[in-house]
Image (tube, grey):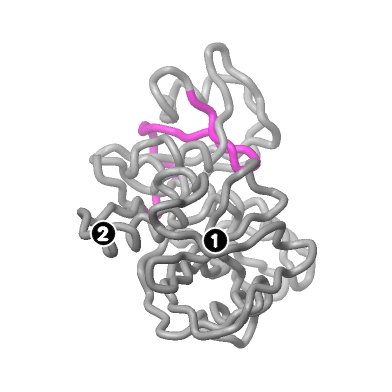
Amino acid sequence: MRWRNVFLDPAQPGGWVLLYSQQHFLCDSNGVLFPREWIQRQDLPVRGEQGIGYLGEDPVYLLLLDHSACLDGCSWQSLRQFMLTGEAEIFRMLSYAAQIGTWFTEHRFCGSCGAPTRQMPGERAMRCDSCNWQHYPRLAPSMIVLVTRDDEILLARSPRFVTGVYSTLAGFVEPGESVEHCVAREVREEVGIEVQDLQYVGSQGWPFPHSLMLGFHARYAGGDIVMQEDEIEDARWFRIDTLPPLPAQRSIARYLIDLYVAQRLGLPKPQLHA
């Protein structure tokens, strides 16, 4: 079923509901959607509710909880788990829902004057009547890049990675810089080399608050690998026929790698689960 994000008035009856708390969603053997009228009869620590859109023809609402309460036969699953194992349309819906949940949680009070805010009717905005400021959902762009040198690709690992796994380089765009400048800066900072011929490849909603990951391919332009302390545990060039353990399938990092390998070997193009 196709997912469409639309502002819905929570005063309307019926529909399905997602239960959300701290980047996790409640699910049971049938998935993440629960009958809304049934959920409304449960004793749950509700912080707020947002109407977020349609899955197929069915309206979907987001119920934000103060903490991860439990229901019989249910468990909490992280947004990242859904990205790696769930259906593409379900992940798109949950990615949007998580961003809306984060926005609502962080803007119950005005960041300018501290006064309570209220939901704007018919609009995804929280308004402060004290200073007339309106707070909308925001995204923080980040970049991820695969650097190549003919049949070699540059991969690195952070101390936070699963043991043995190597991945592409990534970082957040800083104020005042373009994404292209961010790519060059992050590569220079993390591994000490220069890149050229940047090409935008695709994007993916990232399971981290406010994040949108913009994927690039870049060619090596010069320099030797010098790893950034505290950020990079190891970095090296790998031939495309002798790659180390890689990031999980369906992540944009893995897509960038698989796409380049497919192009070099004349294989079918992989699909990005954007």
Frontmost residue, 250 versus 152: 152
Per the image, is 238 magenta? no
Q: Position of residue 40 (x, y in %)?
A: 51, 26
- At label 1, the amino acid type is Leu
Chief secondary structure of the magenta portion: strand
Q: Residue at x 53, y 20 (%)?
A: 41
Q: Are marks 2 and 1 in contact (CB under 8 Å)?
A: no
Frontmost residue, 232 versus 1: 232
Q: Mark 2 or 1, which is nearer the eye? A: 2
Q: Which mark is residue 265?
A: 2
Give the magenta-colored segment's residue range: 5-27
Looking at the image, residue 70 lies above or below residue 175: above
Q: Residues within 10 Å of mark 1 (few under 14, many from 20)?
A: many
- At label 2, the amino acid type is Leu
Looking at the image, residue 35 lies above or below residue 139: above
Q: Position of residue 154 (x, y in %)?
A: 52, 66
Q: Residue at x 63, y 62 (%)?
A: 235
Is 251 on the left or on the right of 45, as rendered? left
Q: Quadrant of the C terminus?
A: bottom left
